[in-house]
Amino acid sequence: MRDFPSCFGENGVQVADASCSSVGGTKPSQNSVTCVYRCKFFGKSCLISIVWSKNLMGQCLSVEIDDASHQCLCKVDVKPSLFSKRKGSKNLEVNSSKIEIFWDLSMAKFGPGPEPVQGYYIAVVWKGDMVLLVGDMRREALKKTGAVASLSSAIFISKKEHISGKRVFGTKAQFSDNGQIHDIKIECDASCSDDPSLLVRVDAKTVMQVKHLQWKFRGNHTIFVDGLPVEVFWDVHNWLFGPSLGNAVFMFHSSLSAEKMWSTGSHSMCDSPAFSWSCSESLRESNMPGLGFSVFLYAWNKD
């Protein structure tokens, strides 16, 4: 979580972490999905990052626990050589206290991305409490760990994903704790038109369109999903003006305070070729309590 990117700086300049930066103009060799959860350890708020990745060597899994200042407390890496076992556990000592991490991927089914879609669990246990349980094999995890489900369960706060495609980029996102999982499609044909536009669809319904994209290559707009306001930020500068293997960055942010923020008229920025990023400062702290959920998408164009 220490390198979790602030995609839009105060001057509208894209800032990316090392995992998604291109080296020498080449696309990163691995696809990755990072899911971040807020939980409690040692009586204070901490962050657990689960990173799924896939490269030429195979499937990888990483679990990292950071404190509130993003300092790493402990980390477990399951490398491709260990994936052959598909299940395991690791005991870690932090501040004279034991943290146990369990995983079982023996029945995991994967889609096109590096993240499993079903048949797995990852469990983080501290002092006999199930601090975090991810996956659909809840019963198996509780039996294996002997842990008690914690009353202060972890909260899913952000997801970062690398996706690639030609004109169309798709992913799935859930904008509230118990909300519906939605299909998100981003469409842009920057190469075949003198006046490219950007479309965002949620469950096949067009919720946003940006025309004159060559002037509005960075911007923000509010859409509504499940009755909640969701702020959409985009930066497609590299698609239009950068190297052929450049990536665009999108952020979808749901927040309880979003409606109040946008009632001030900030959404009108999308209608101007000159964008102000004054609100991006608050989005840098989108992983703080009560500020909702964020999805970051790094979209790599195969063309």
Image (spheres, helix red, strand yellow):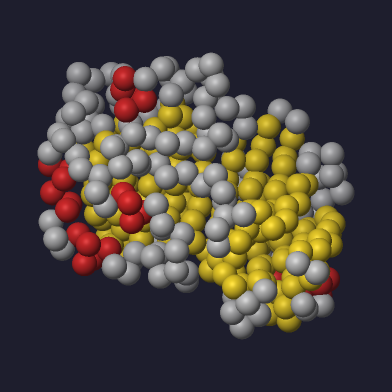
Q: Quadrant of the C terminus?
A: top left
- Horizontal and vertical percent for residue 7? 40, 41
Tell me what residue is drawn at x 46 percent, y 59 percent. 287
Using the image, determine if residue 237 lies above or below residue 110. above
- Horizontal and vertical percent for residue 132? 66, 68
Task: Give the side of residue 111 with respect to residue 10, left or right.
Answer: right
Is residue 181 in view? no
Using the image, determine if residue 158 lies above or below residue 198. below
Tell me what residue is drawn at x 33 percent, y 56 percent. 282
Front residue of 16 and 210: 16
Snapshot quadrant of residue 57:
top right
Task: Give the side of residue 80 with respect to residue 42, left or right.
Answer: right
Using the image, determine if residue 108 lies above or below residue 157. above
- Horizontal and vertical percent for residue 61? 71, 47
Tell me what residue is drawn at x 62 percent, y 27 percent. 29
Tell me what residue is drawn at x 32 percent, y 28 percent. 237
